[in-house]
Amino acid sequence: MPSYQIALCQMDIRFGDPVLNQKKVRGFFEQAASLDKKPDIIIFPELWNTGYDLTRLDDIADPEGKQTKELLSELSRQHQVYTIGGSVAEKRETGTFNASFVFSPEGEIIHTYRKAHLFRLMEEEKYLLPGESLAGFTLDGMPALLQICYDIRFPEGIRSGALAGAEVLFVAAEWPHPRLAHWRQLLIARAIENQMYVVACNRAGTDPRNTFCGHSMIIDPWGEVIAEGEEEEAIVTGEIDRALVSEVRGRIPVFSDRRTDLYML
């Protein structure tokens, strides 16, 4: 498939209420899947099951991600779409992770990513364990990379994915004010410098300590914004075309012009 229709579910998240948030995800998913231009890929924001109710994760995190996997597997299979499952608080024997699962249209998990860079301003390091891999994955033959929120401030990992062939970066986030400008500029920079699509789903709404930016975005390999939400709940849609990645990388050969004798990446 040379191109993909994308739907980003920019939803508000009820603080510390996994049951209600699962119902919201189901509603957004069904609404997105019913659009006139049916999406090939649906993506959700970060920590959509609990929000940043980190002090209660022992009680409300999803054990082994079981409920999340069952829900998103069912919906992916029912609607025959790929799902970038945002991320959830996943409770494991070793501790709790900020984890994302990717599903095929058959409902199978094709990739798992756990947030590598924990955000100290929201005290993630006190309640979550960091993931230990930045490996990419393949979606319908398209090399892809998945990152979570704060990860986008670390270009080394994203460049490593691009060097391995990734053509699209998917991002799930709960990015708050007052750093909306950082969100937009970092995402656009990651697209330009890696000559890849960036598909980034942020949450809307508020929690007891933060107001979130929204502005979910789809950005092409030239850094042009294809689609962008506002701050309220919305489904943001757009299309990505794999052929443009090859065209951009061919016209400006950034990767082959790197001076690896002067720097590590």
Image (tube, helix red, strand yellow):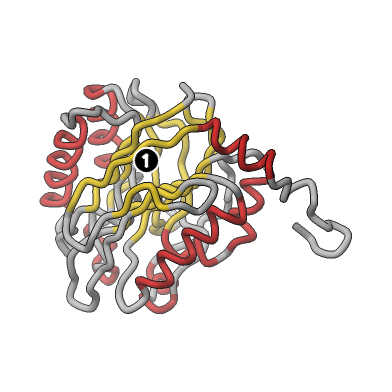
Would you say 69 lies left or right of 25 here?
A: right
Could you tell me the amino acid type at mark 1? Ile
Residue highlighted by disc 1: 84
Would you say 30 lies left or right of 257 here?
A: left
The percent coordinates of residue 71 (x first, y second) are 23, 35
Q: Quarter-wise, where is residue 176 in the image?
A: bottom left
Q: Is residue 216 above or below residue 242?
A: below
* Residue nearest the observer in this picture, 152 or 88: 152
Q: Residue at x 79, y 46 (%)?
A: 256
* Residue nearest the observer in this picture, 39 or 138: 39
Q: Quarter-wise, where is residue 61 in the image?
A: bottom left
Q: Residues within 10 Å of mark 1 (few under 14, many from 20)?
A: many
Q: Is residue 225 above or below residue 16?
A: above
The percent coordinates of residue 187 (x first, y second) are 47, 59
Q: Residue at x 38, y 76 (%)?
A: 123
Q: Residue at x 31, y 37 (%)?
A: 42
Q: Residue at x 18, y 69 (%)?
A: 206
* Residue nearest the observer in this picture, 44 or 234: 234
The percent coordinates of residue 207 (x first, y second) are 19, 71
Image quadrant for the C terminus? bottom right
Would you say 257 lies left or right of 47 here?
A: right
Would you say 41 lies left or right of 78 here?
A: right
- Can the viewer see residue 119? yes
